[in-house]
Structure formats: C-alpha cells, structure tokens
Amino acid sequence: MIRFVNASKRYSSGFDALQNVNFHMAPGEMAFLTGHSGAGKSSLLKLIALLERSSRGQVIVNNQNLAKVPRRRIPYFRRNIGIIFQDHQLLFDRTVFDNVALPLIIAGYSRHDIAKRVRAALDKVGLLGKEKKYPITLSGGEQQRVGIARAVVNKPPLILADEPTGNLDPELSAEIMGLFQDFSDVGVTVLVATHDIALISQLPYRTLTLKDGKLINDTQPAS
Amino acid sequence: MNNTSRQRDTQHRPNIVTLLQSYFIRHIQVFFYSLGQLSRTPVSTLMTCLVIGIALALPTGLHTLLKNAQQLSGGWESTAQISVFLKKNISASQAKNLKQDIQRWPDVLSVHYISREQALKEFQDLSGFGNALKALNSNPLPSVLIIKPKLSKTNEQATQKLLNKLTNLRQTDKAQLDMQWVRRLYAIMNIVERGVLILGLLLALAVLLVVGNTIRLAIQNRRKEIVVMKLIGGTDAFIRRPFLYTGFWYGLFGGIIAWLLVSFTLLSISRPIEKLTTLYQNQFELNNMSFLTTLALLGLSILLGLFGSWFAVGRHLREIEPQ
C-alpha cells in the first residue's frame, strides 16, 4: 500500500527533513510512526498525501508512483486517503453533518447516498444524533471523532493520522485508537504518527521510529 | 488495496449518471449557496454592487443619450434646405413668380416663400429685438425662398448642383445650404461616441478590478475552508465554483443597479427635455434603453463579474496550499 524507496526530502532552506527512508506497508496493515518533534513524522505523512513531493527517491502509494501524479490529478489521488489532523481541520460555520458530508459532496455522491453514509460514519464514531450541532459546541474528543468520521466517510483504503490524540486524555486516546483498530480490521491501511510512547507500547502494532529524518527503528510487535 | 475492498469501493462509487446528476444539482446548490453567502453581508454586498452599478451606469447613460441625439438629428439631414435670400429690389410678385418657376424644377420638392414683412414679423416675435427693429426706418430683411431639394440625403452632388443653380439666378443675393451645421454636429457626435467608448472600456476595467479585489478578499476570508477542501480532494474547479458564482451575482446585481440608475435619470430629465424641444417646435420623446441594450448591459456586466472573479481565483487559489 505504501512503499518508500530511498526517499529524501530537503527543503529549499537546505534542511533535510527525511533522508533515505525505506519501508513498506502491506494493505490492511496498521502501524505507528513515532519520533521526537522535528524528526520528520509530518514530512513523511505529507509525502504520502502529496502535500509535498520527495526530493529524491520514490514514494509509491496504492500502486501509484507519486512523482508521476500531475498536479491536476492530486485531488483525485487524495480522495483515496482519509487524513486526520491534530487540530481536526473542521469547518466551524457548518454542522457536523455538513462537515462529514464534504468528501462525498466533492466526489459527487447523490443526496440519498450522502445522508446514508454520513449517518453510518457518525454511528461508527458514536456521534449519531449530533449531526445538527456545530463543531464548536462539541468537546475536543468529539471534534476529533467528527474529523475521523469525515476521513472515513467515503471508505478510503488508506488512513493517515497526524497526532490524532495530541490534545486528548489517555482514556479518550485509547478510544480513538480503538476506532483505528476497527478500520484496520476491515482491511484499511492505517498509519498513525504520534509521540505518545505510552499509548503505543500498549498496542500490538508495528512501530516505525524516525530520528533526524532517518528511519532508525522498524519493530514488529512480539506475536 | 486488497480485492474485497476494491470490489466494495467500485460497488459504492457513484456511476456516471449519478455523477452528472449530482454535478448539475451541485451547480444549482452553489448558485443559491453563493447568493446566500452574499445575503449574509448585505451592506458590503450592496456597496460592491453599487460601485459596479455606478461605473456601468455612466457609459450606458451616455450611450443612451447619444443614441437619442442621433435619432433626433437623423431626421434633420433629410430636412436639409436651401435658403435663397433675394435681392432687395425684387418685388413680392416677382418673388412669387420665381417661386412658381422653381417649383417646377425636377430636383425641387417644395418651395416656401417668406416675404420681407413676414420675415420681419417672425424676427420680431422670436428674437426679442423687436423694439430695436422699430427704431429702423426701413425693413432690413430680404425676402426668402426656402427650398427643399429632392433626395438631398442620398445625393450630395445633386444638392450642390441645385445650390449652384440657385446662386446663379439673377434675383438671388445669396443662396445657402443649411447643412453645414448638421455635418459639424455629426462630427462632434462621432468624437463624443469615441469618448463614450473609451470611457466605457476604462470603467469596464474598473469593474473587473473591483470584482477581482472583492473576490480576493473573499478568498482570504475563506482560506481555511479552501485548505480543508484541498486536503480532502476538492478539485480546483470545485473550489473555484462558489467564487465564480459570487462574481456572477455581483455582475448581475451591478447591471440591474446600472439599469435602474440610467432609467431613473432618463425619466427625471425627460420632462425638461420635452420642454426644451417644444421650444424648438420639435416633437421629441426621450427613449429609454432598448430591450437589446438592456440585455447587452446585463450580459456584459455578468461577464465582467465572472471574468473579474476568474482572474482573482486564478491568481490566489494556487497560493493557498495545505501546510
């Protein structure tokens, strides 16, 4: 699903965010991406979501070499990735329903389908019944779950999460991680960037560790 | 992607008919959504539309006035007439004979005789110099034959020939073609027309800039929304659409305001103009913009709104990328 081959990212300032990163994630696999802030976690996710392009090496996602995706195809490529952000990136002038429906509207689903799928996604994250509320009236954990519902509503084969539990207490964090596990169980590839070592250590998943832009550790869970 | 999830995806992806349907529904939604967005900030929307309306009303109003003036003066060319001032020693009966002579000429439509007494009376009535004239011992005015040539409009040479013929009559003191001033008026109107065109172009450019700047601000205000759209796979066309429709609405409302401004202005000056033309013994009615002119105004104004927002969106949408 995701393959990095000697991928490097150097910014125009000369800063090397990633250096010769190599790894492969199979479809349906779930993994954590960890490391100190500034280690390159966000840069790595940005390369996968084509928010940035690698300076050297190859990034292959969903059998597509990202270097060969032209700018105008990027939106269609991103529709296959559900992205979850630490700051949720919700639109506060729209209801929960409208926020979650956005990817479906963009993809051109019918109204009937949209309503059905949005309810299903909200049900999945336990927010059914809050669809008419505005995100500002929800708690941090609920907002994050709206963000997750939006990321999974069009059933993408790949989910990227950037510090999804950054602002949440351990109990809520575990709940969110439980959701990711559920998605992984139904065949979705999930990559979660987090520096919450305590949380990772409790969960039986592969962990990729970055340090100064280099992949220094790739541990499989003891089975 | 494994096989089962691929199957599941293709099953649930919208097919081409649904896509087309939702494309049109989406357009209609955005059409009204952008209108709703504008109605949320009525004052600033109204101000923008007013600026557009005033900018467009100026050249439109001038154009309409010019069209009226052209229509009014269009009749004058055919009424070109030659005034033949007769020598003072020509008596009234001689003049009448001459009138009948000339009337039989093939290139003459009609001849109207104004005697010296009639001329004096008319001059006294109309010029306001009546008392001054009374101080004179004798009537200083000659008798005049007013001659309307046939086909003068289409054949200028024939008119000139007739003029020469009349000048060479032994009874003629002076023959004068009353066309010169009409030609001058046309020349002036041509210049004015050119000026209105240039003014119109400049103000159209101003409208483009106004709409462009307004849309640029709207884009800045909705920066976050644009970022989110881009993150979840919104195409440029999708993100551009509401702004283009906003430009459309600005253009439409600006055009309507321009139409109202011109119509009310014309209405308010039509009475004084009517008075003025009756003073010139002329029947003239000030016409409002024709249906076609109105359509052209609205169409042009909508196009300016669309282009203005297109430029702004093209310039600024690319700058906003998710970080």
Image (cartoon, rainbow, N blue to C red):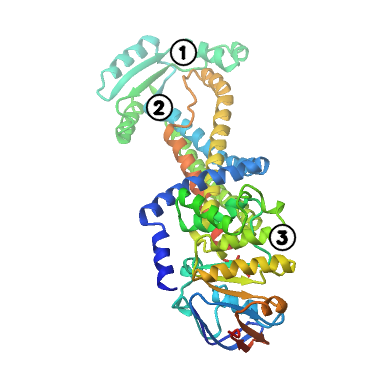
Give me the chain letter of mark 3: A
Assign the N terminus of chain B to one quadrant of the image. Answer: bottom left
- Mark 1 and mark 3 in contact? Answer it, CB < 8 Å: no
* Disc nearest the viewer among 2 and 3: 3
In what element is the residue under mark 1? Answer: helix
Q: Name the residue under label 3.
A: A140
Please name which of the two marks, 1 or 2, marks the residue nearer to the observer: 2
Chain letter, disc 1 residue: B
Q: In this view, does A104 lie above or below B66?
A: below
Label 3: element kind: helix
Q: Residue at x 31, y 36 (%)?
A: B157
Q: Is mark 2 on a helix, strand or loop?
A: helix
Q: Viewer-nearest of labels 1 and 3?
A: 3
Image spot of residue B11 (x, y percent): 39, 61
- The residue to which callout 2 is attached is B75
Q: Which of B288 and B65 is in front in this view?
A: B288
| Residue A117 visible (yes or no) | yes
| Amino acid type at image mark 2 | Gly
The quarter of the picture where residue B104 lies is: top left
